[in-house]
Image (cartoon, rainbow, N blue to C red):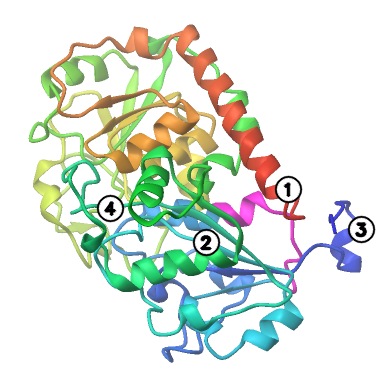
Amino acid sequence: MIWTLSILDMKNNNYPRILFIGEYPDVFDKIKSPYKSETTFDQTFDPTFFVNNGGNRGNLVWQESVFRIFNYNHLKSRRVTFEYLYDNQKKIDDEFDFIVINLACWINNRPFRPNNFISKLKFKKSKVICLGNGCIKNGYINSNPNLSKDFFHPSVVESLRWMFDNAEVFSVRGESTMSTLKCLFNIDSVALGCPSAYAFPDSINNISLKPFKDSLLASADYISKYDGVNFPALYNEFNKFKSSSYFCQSSFQFSEGSNIEFPKNTKLNQIGNVKINECDGSLKNYPFEIKAIDKIYAPNNIDNWRGVLSMHDYYIGTRLHCAMLSLQAGVFPFIFYDDERPLEVANLIGMPHMNSGSNDSFKLEEIFSKKNLKNFQQKYKESYNIFRKTISQTGLVL
């Protein structure tokens, strides 16, 4: 069955009912019982709900994106953790048309959280769709080229086989993860990228270029003089712009609030009346010495984060999901990578990128050129059409 879309569908409930499976229990689980992790759609979009998200605001981006991509019945759809599946199989089959499992880099050597029961799950009616899974090898996918399947935790392998056996679509972030699963486990998957790439396709198609001297630049962790890139040269490139903003993706966690803006000379132990709950080692590396950076943001609200990014014209940084949110906001990104987690996503959609360990010279006028923008938009269009076609074959409509 293909669900057709119209304004009236919201009233007559013709949208499909989707059970969304999220990754972080502390993000979704207001009830601290391991098997009572259900939340309503409205609860999970509270502006302060995503504060605890694994210490990385980028987790907000890919988790939120699936709710932007699909058309579904908001009143009869739910967001839950994996634990909810344990003793609700019949209820799920009766109440939901689809189960959408949205993951990040769970293919690694750590235990897969629902490792005691996932192989026992069987759904007779609800269709399973798995999105966004990526591979981590010793933290960095290219740090161990001779990796064997023994590296991966048995519960991860079990979960992968369950997804392969049960999912209508079992997709991964890119070609590297796809080849790893095939070579080591003989598990077939399809490389569709990160769901965050497909939440606002029109914004990406409408990206335009402006002269740097009239433009605002956005950046995110870990652009600092302590990293591997030739940052003195990068600083000079930053200073070509009219102004720049810096987004703290992972160093701060606030108890409440949305975007918190502070001048570059502000004491780092307190910002206004908002106390910092946590900071990490990258704090000392912040590039306050870059003259072009005028504003620094620590976003806790995904809509505000995207909104502030939309006031910029270009993005340069090492953080993938700030780059993806920039795309959603219609901002042309250039990403530095030090492992294949961001690289395989960038390759899949054609995002301009560069190895952070490279000493190659570069000019942003060449990177942010009309030719590169055209090539990126063409590659993105191809990837989006493949994603759309693959998902639509299950009966879901984007």
Of callouts 1 and 2, the N-terminal one: 2
Of callouts 4 and 1, the N-terminal one: 4
Position of 221 relative to 232 (above/below) = below
Residue 258: percent from left, percent from top:
43, 56
* Residue 351: mark in rendering: none
Q: Secondary structure at mark 3?
A: loop
Q: The residue under label 1 is which amino acid type?
A: Ser
- Residue identifier under label 3: 8
Q: Secondary structure at mark 2?
A: helix
Q: Nearer the viewer, mark 3 or mark 4?
A: 4
Q: Residue sitting at 61 percent across and 27 percent down?
A: 381
CB-based contact (under 8 Å), mark 3 and mark 4: no
Of callouts 3 and 2, the N-terminal one: 3
* Residue 136: mark in rendering: 4
- Residue identifier under label 2: 164
Residue 300: percent from left, percent from top:
40, 57
Query: Gap in Å between the C-alphas at discs 3 and 4?
Result: 44 Å
For the magenta stretch, what is the residue range? 65-76
Q: Nearer the viewer, mark 1 or mark 2?
A: 2
- Residue identifier under label 1: 392
Residue 62: percent from left, percent from top:
47, 52
